[in-house]
Amino acid sequence: MKLTVLGCYAATPRTFTNPTSQVLEIKNHLFLIDCGEGTQVQLRKYKIKFSRINHIFISHLHGDHFFGLPGLISTFRLLGREKELHIYGPKGIKHAITLFLKLGDSWTNYPLIFHELESKESELIFEDEKVTVNTVPLIHRVYTNGYLFREKEAPRTLDIEAARAYRIDKSQFNNIKKGKDGVDPSGKLVSNKKLTLDPPEPKSYAFCSDTVYNEAILPIIKGVTVLYHESTFLESEEHLCEKTKHSTAKQAAQIAKKANAKLLILGHYSTRYKSIELFKKEAEEVFPVVELADDGKVFDFGR
Ligand SMILES: [Zn+2]
């Protein structure tokens, strides 16, 4: 699982900072999460293959989270894309995008498939044999969802050393991989557990932006490997959270702690602050393992 942060600052694009967009690589998928203005340029800069993006998840319809989408959709057309593109986002996103395409008489040649969301409950919106994606309903000024990406538990793998030690014949290996017990040359049963290795623990990633402090998300993200939680403000500006429906670094850390996350990544910093190091310092007083997102930063969480 690997995360590339393309942009992680609030509000307007600036010379050296970009609005929200991330690419999550998980089990051979490249999921694009949010698509602020400038996302295409960032994708090029960090050498992410456009053709590998088949699913785009948009949290909400504020410009700094989706104004890059019409541009990216038309670039896909210019690049001769033929594959389906799936877009998940709040109800209204289809209308917004199709209006752009219609007015410019620039319909895509490839199938554009919208999955419009309007539920206030967490929903399973994507599933294949290795990954699931659920919404994480957030509280913001407009209808907003975070997303929880989860690896499914992999099957147990054959422990070749153990199989040799028990003198299990190769002809049984396929069945053992499927969960069957083995039989040694004397006809004695050897349990599957003795012949296989535990699969690696499934990893998960929760993207939670934009939102006020909201404990209702805890049951959904409980035990998550990596939590990205917005921290627009520092505690000194906490009075702005209620009106703007954003969180402080400290609040993000409280959510990480209560959710028993393994790692917290902060982002969506207000551009009023000169240094983002202060966000880390504030969060670390509540939760020990904090990283700062920054444009172009890559987090590799291993296989
Ligand atoms: Zn917003």
Image (cartoon, rainbow, N blue to C red):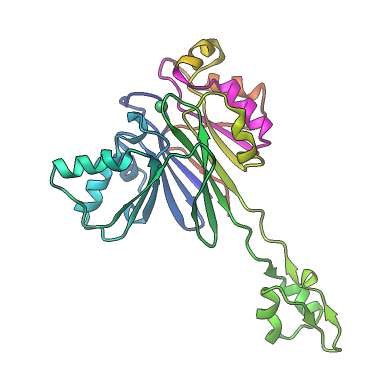
In this rendering, position of residue 281 left or right of residue 164: left
Which residue is depicted at the point 62% across and 43% down?
225
Residue 132 shows in this picture: yes
In this rendering, position of residue 17 left or right of residue 95: right
Corner quadrant of residue 17 = top left
Corner quadrant of residue 284 = top right
Q: Is residue 258 a member of the stretch shown in magenta? A: yes
Residue 20: x %, y % from top left: 40, 33
Which residue is depicted at the point 65% across and 65% down?
155
Corner quadrant of residue 41 = top left
If the picture is divided into quarters, which one holds ligand 1?
top left
| Of residues 82 and 112, the one drawn nearer to the viewer in this rendering | 112
| Of residues 202 and 274, the one drawn nearer to the viewer in this rendering | 202
Farthest-out residue, bottom: 186
Residue 53: x %, y % from top left: 37, 52
Residue 153: x %, y % from top left: 63, 58
Q: Which residues are magenta?
A: 244-272
